[in-house]
Structure formats: C-alpha cells, structure tokens
Image (cartoon, grey):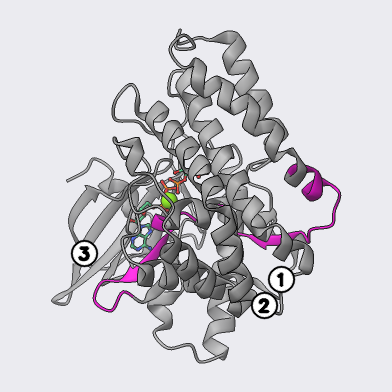
Amino acid sequence: MSTYSHILTHFQLEGQLQKLQAWGGGHINHTYLAEYEQDGHRLRYILQRINQQVFRQPEAVMHNLAVVCTHLYRKWQKAGLADLERKCLQYVPTRQGQAAYVDETGAYWRVLRFIEHSVAIDYVQRPEQAFEAARAFARFQQGLEGLEVTEIRETIPFFHHLGRRYAQFQQALAADVAGRKAGVEAEIELAHQQYERNLPLLQALEQGHIPLRIVHNDTKINNVLLDAHSGQGLCVIDLDTLMPGSLLYDFGDMLRTFTSPVPEDEPDVSRVRLQLPLFEALCRGYLPPLRKLLTPAEGELLLAAGHYMTFIMGLRFLTDYLMGDVYYKTRFPTHNLLRARNQFALIQNMDQQAAAMQRILKEVMR
Ligand code: ADP
Ligand code: GN1
Ligand code: MG
C-alpha cells in the first residue's frame, strides 16, 4: 500500500480502501490507482499529485478541470450521450467541496473517477485505434464549444511557442550543465535547421489569422481512453494543459503520436515511420466532425502543424537532455535523447511522404 493513503481520507470517498498503487505512463504527474470496496462492490479512483515544477499555478489547473468537467457533463447529459459516466472525466470533491486537497507541504492532490474497462495505449497499431482516438478528441472539441476562452486560465504560458522553446534550447546549449553537448552535434544542427523551417507557422499563429480556441494542447495517444473490448474512443483525459490556443496544436500532436506504430522511446529509430493508413484514419476520425468549425486558414496549415508539434517535442526532449533530465520522467540517461531522435526521424519521414499526405487530406476534406 502506498504511503499516500491518508491523502484519500480528505476526499468524499466511501467504503474501505483495499489497494493503492502507482499507475500509468504519463511523463509529468504522479498517478496512483486506488481501489475501494463498498457493500461488496469494487470502486476505483485515480489519485494524482500535480507536478508543481511544471504547473506553477496548480489552482489554475484545478479551476480549468472543474470548469471543463462541469460544462461537458451538463452539455452531454442534456444531449443524451450514451455511457456518459465513461465518456466524461469527473473528479471527486474533497470533504470541504474543493476540487483539490492541498496537503501540509503545499502539494496539490486530486481524485478522478476511474474509467472502467478502458485502456490507454502508448502507440497505435491499427487504423481503427487512430480513428477512434481522433473521434474522441473531435467530440471533446465539439463539447468545448460554448465555453468562453475567458473562463479558462493559462496553466503554462507560451506552452507551444516555438520562439520560447528555441530560446530555452539555446540557453541549455550555452550552459551545457550536464556536459552532454559533445556527442549530439548532429541533433543540434538539425534543431537549428528545423527551427527556421517552422517559423512560418509561428508567424501565422502570431498574426492572429488562426482562431484562438480552448484546446487540449496534449493530444498524445495515451491521453485518450479507449474501450477495452470494442476499442471505441471513450474519454479524453489529462486536462492540465487545456487552455486557450490553436486547434492546430491538437491536430499536430495527434499527427505526431497517432501515425508511427512504435512507442515514443522506440530504441530502433529506423522503425519510426509515418504510416499513411494511420494518418488517413486520424484525418477521418477528427476532421469531418469539426468541418463546420474549421476555418480555411486552419485547414491550410494542418500538415505544417504536424511538423511544428513534432519538432517542438523533439526540441523539448533535446533541451531536457542537455539540462540533465530535469523536466520529463526518464528511466535511463539517454532516454530524452532517444525521444528527441525519434521525433526528428518522424519529421524527416513526414517530409518524404508529404505529397501522399496532402492527397489524403484533400480527399477527406472534400
Ligand atoms: P500525466 O500528466 O502524467 O500524463 P495523466 O493524467 O495523463 O498524467 O494520467 C496518467 C495515466 O493514468 C494515463 O495515461 C492513464 O493511463 C491513467 N489515467 C488517468 N486518468 C484516468 C482515469 N480517469 N481513468 C482511467 N485511467 C486514467
Ligand atoms: C508530456 O503529461 P504527458 O505525459 O501526457 C508533456 C507534453 C508532451 C509529452 C511528450 C505538461 O505529456 O507536452 O508532448 O509529455 N506535458 C507537459 O510525450 O509538458
Ligand atoms: Mg498524460
């Protein structure tokens, strides 16, 4: 049993705690699965401690979670969405009625209802998975419609701002605190080239031609739960980075994580390849439901967004490697470097298949 069981006593949970164990493969928060027994029934919950190194304003994170969960639940309930309890993320309030419990050290804890009979996959193997996951993200986006951008707080300023990310990379390079610069010259060179190349999208975003929307900002494949039996897309999770931004970030991050059928830290870089059937499934799952919402400017930049987001993640992994692994959870010393190399390999592979991707996109958007 984890030593955190006393934290659970502060939440509106009934029954006997049976088990508490570490859970999931996220890179950021500390996640545990809590199992209760109540009147012969098993009830499960996710207990999470927010990573406050990453989220400097945990109250903003919790504010957004509460606003979005309430909005989606009401909207979908009114619409009669089937299986609502498994399609809408819900938190359990504290005994004081708050969304989070702040412990004596100032740490923020929250409890979420566990979505039963679901799976979070770390990489896509079949087109149906990409389709279903994309459809769940599209439903989520549609659900957010009607919520004002001003109701949502910014949890990480400049989260997907290429200029800021490049500046952080340059600082890490200059400081070279971990002495890792030597040995990654090729990656550094690539990062400089790709920065230049992705600047036009940054400019387009900054010029205000792209609508500012509430978006998820972290649409990687393991942030959506699929039904364990049918594979149906169920519930979008990990709402910590949900904030005003561009829908291009979300499509771009899906393109990054739904289209290459290997994990983000696949040791054999040559296996990192964009598969067109997965790309097509992603487009078919995500774009048609959002057709009315998408502006022509957004439509034009979808592929560029895949590049942009894949590059930003590669750059962030490389920066963290240079800084000595201070941000992402890592399991071995070259973990971040491997992740960065895989992102860069994916970008190069996207380039090789750009024409075919364009054709598919055109076909789906017709
Ligand atoms: P991180 O920010 O660290 O990625 P997440 O919120 O994505 O944290 O949670 C980590 C993992 O925990 C997810 O990938 C998923 O496997 C599991 N998880 C999180 N919330 C739920 C939930 N409500 N029901 C079932 N599993 C969940
Ligand atoms: C982190 O929290 P998680 O593991 O879903 C990161 C994302 C990266 C992703 C790369 C707050 O996501 O931005 O794309 O790792 N989240 C944060 O796998 O930095
Ligand atoms: Mg996550």
Earlier-in-chain disc, 3 versus 2: 3
Q: Identify the residue under disc 1.
A: 294
Crowd around label 1: few <14 · some 14–19 · many ≥20 (10 Å): some
> Can see residue 114?
yes
Q: Under tag 1, what secondary structure?
A: loop
Q: Identify the residue under disc 3.
A: 36
> Which percent across, then down, holds residue 131?
44, 71
Quarter containing the C terminus: bottom right
Amino acid type indicated by mark 3: Tyr
User: Which region of the structure is painted magenta?
Assistant: 202-231
> Which percent across, then down, holds residue 59?
59, 48
Crowd around label 3: few <14 · some 14–19 · many ≥20 (10 Å): some
Classify residue 248 by image quadrant. bottom right
Q: Are marks 1 and 2 in contact (CB under 8 Å)?
A: yes
Assess whether residue 218 is covered by the magenta stretch: yes
69 up-or-down from 351: above or below: below
Amino acid type indicated by mark 2: Arg
Mark seen at residue 291: 2
